[in-house]
Amino acid sequence: MATEVFLPKMSDNMEAGVIVAWLVKDGERVEKGQPILEVETDKAAVELEAPEGGILRGIRPGVEPGAIVPVGETIAFIALTLDELVPSLVSLGATRAHAVGTGMEPPAAQTRSADLTEAAETGPVRATPPVRRLARRLGIELQEVTGTGPDGRVTERDLHAFVDEKNRVQSPRTLSVSPRVAEPRQMSPVARRMAEAHGVDLTQVQAGNARGRIRTKDVRAFLESAQTGLAGTGVEGEAEWVNLTRAQLTTGRRMLQSLQTAPQFSLTSIVDMTRALELREAESARIEAETGVRPSVTGLLIRVVADALNRYRRVNASFVEGRVKLHRQVNIGVAVGTEQGLLVPVIRNADKKSLADITRELKSLQEKAGRLRFGPSDLSGGTFTISNLGMFGVDNFYAIVNPPESAILAVGRIVKTPVGLPDERIVLRPMMNITLSIDHRCLDGQQGAEFLALVKQRLEQLSPIS
């Protein structure tokens, strides 16, 4: 039986992906794990791997470079043989990517995608009876909700996400959606997805009909006018306009959401890195022989923090619908700056990896960040984040918690600093600031302080580790 190839969720907040290129043609043989498709997510370009070995068959019509494909959509099949029958998939009917200034979509393709999307808008909203009942109970018009299920189906999760977003943009005194309050802007689900894909603020879009309902052609017109406006900025000679990348738009949106929804506070400690640097020097030759690169301070931090997270599980947690979810895996994200913006690739099961393993993975992730090409699981599943700006000369900073995580560790540079010893001597020691930002819903100040103290203690008392 043929195996479905569908678009998975490749980053924590991914709802759709833009097809960049097929790496394998219909009818060609593939091996399990072989990259077959390149997809642009909200973070970076990701290579989708074949779930099984066999023959790539039945690529879905419309899934071509530039198409926007929702998460979960079936896009092709892996058959055992070339003659095996596979289901026939209907055309995706997705809008093609037309980001301002990219030139990704030619005029002929714009016309074709406009026909497809306008046809999709006029169809009925797909939803199960329980979802429709829930929508009526919450006073939500299904036409206003972006469906993320198969074929754009609206799910219960979509309804709850719609409620959360509406509560966020309403007055702070408004705690829930009122059935009597209508959404300020009416829009089609396809138009909403198109706007989100390009980072368009829908409050700036003018509806082209008397009902005030925003359609894809209105979003497209806004994008085209913005492109025209950018092209003409040279006349003023007073300013230069720069378009944000998808990664920058997503990061800004998530950080704003984090500050608005999570009560956050920070704790700072100063660490004597003498033993840690001695250990790194002692282990450098062995690890460089294994991995081809010297171990870094970030690698040491990941190893130490991973062990501490196993002891203080509330730090390795998420706040979900009024409860704290304690993660069994320790997946540490490492904030990396790229030309496209801030990315957070993840080292999975960091508590089970040696310093050499972590060093090897860090090298691989840094190379992928340089090319902006990641694997399907490189940017998702993080449970804790480390952001090290010490290499840029930053002494101390406060990082914003990366949702849905409960904490993030900000790391400054190592500076030789006068330190008073118990025997009253003053010596120069390599000191480093570490700052833990915390979601107060998951843990309190004492729990955060105990975790930070354990990290400090282990860094200052490091002995050879595997």
Image (spheres, helix red, strand yellow):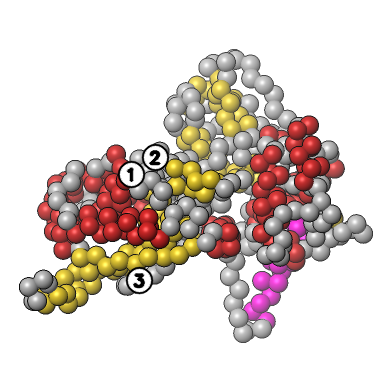
Image quadrant holding the N terminus, namely top right
Asked if the residue under mark 2 is in contact with the one under mark 1, i.e. CB atoms within 8 Å, the reply is: no
Q: Is residue 101 above or below residue 4?
A: below
Q: Is residue 274 above or below residue 107?
A: below
Q: Position of residue 247 (x, y in %)?
A: 53, 57
In front: 90, or 453? 453
Q: Earlier in the sequence, mark 1 or mark 2?
A: 1
Q: Earlier in the sequence, mark 3 or mark 2?
A: 2
Q: CA distance from mark 1 to mark 2?
A: 9 Å
Q: Position of residue 100 (x, y in %)?
A: 65, 61
Check disc 2 and give the amino acid type. Answer: Gln
Which residue in the structure is indicated by mark 3? 396
Within 10 angstroms of label 1, few (less than 14), some, or many (20 or more) residues? some
Identify which residue is drawn at 47% across, 52% down: 442
Image quadrant holding the C terminus, namely top left
Tell me the quarter of the picture where residue 462 sits. bottom left
Q: Nearer the viewer, mark 1 or mark 3?
A: 1
Q: CA distance from mark 1 to mark 3?
A: 26 Å
Could you tell me if residue 409 is visible in this image? no
Could you tell me if residue 443 is visible in this image? yes
In front: 175, or 84? 175
Q: Position of residue 303 (x, y in %)?
A: 27, 49
Q: Earlier in the sequence, mark 1 or mark 3?
A: 1
Q: Which mark is residue 310?
A: 1
Within 10 angstroms of label 3, few (less than 14), some, or many (20 or more) residues? some
Which residue in the structure is indicated by mark 2? 329
Start-end of magenta stretch = 217-235
Q: Is residue 222 magenta?
A: yes
